Amino acid sequence: MSYKINDVAFGNIINITENSITVLTKDGYNFLILKKDITDWKNTKLNFMFNINEKINFIVLTCESKNNCTGSFKFNHPQFSRSPFEYGLNPTKGNFKKLKNSVDQLIGEYKNDKNKIN
């Protein structure tokens, strides 16, 4: 099997250093995953996060040959990123009037139901 950029790959950790882990896939590909591609948290110790022979999944960044591949753990595990998502709210054509009217209606229905119970 050959790996393309952004593929999800699975493998067992065969080496853990202070700055990287090495993962061996079932089909014999070696992936180096650098600490910067594992977590954004600087004080994290990789040997406390992972164990030898632990099976993990990751995203393929590059793969030029069986022994020259890189991956990213944090792309597939956003809890290890400081800001994994970009947030933005763009105005709509109606400037959120429909949303406001819908919320106001639901609040009104809730108040009416509450008055019926009491």
Image (tube, grey):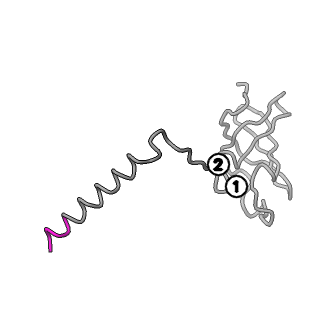
Mark 2 or 1 closer to N-term?
Answer: 1
Along the line of sight, which residue is nearer the eye, 16 or 107? 107
Q: Which residues are magenta?
A: 113-118
Image x and y of residue 27, in percent: 72, 31
Give the prevailing secondary structure in the magenta stretch: helix
Give the amino acid type for the residue marked by disc 2 in the picture.
Glu
| Camera-nearest residue between 114 and 82 | 114
* Secondary structure found at label 2: loop
Residue 106 found in image quarter: bottom left
Q: Residue 110 in the image: x percent, y percent?
A: 25, 62
116 or 105, nearer to the observer: 105
Q: Amino acid at mark 1?
A: Ser
Q: CA distance from mark 2 to mark 1?
A: 12 Å
Image point 35% across, 55% down: which residue?
103
Q: Is residue 8 left or right of residue 103?
A: right
Query: Which residue bears the numbered disc 2?
Result: 86
Q: Residue at (66%, 44%) from the top-left corner?
A: 57
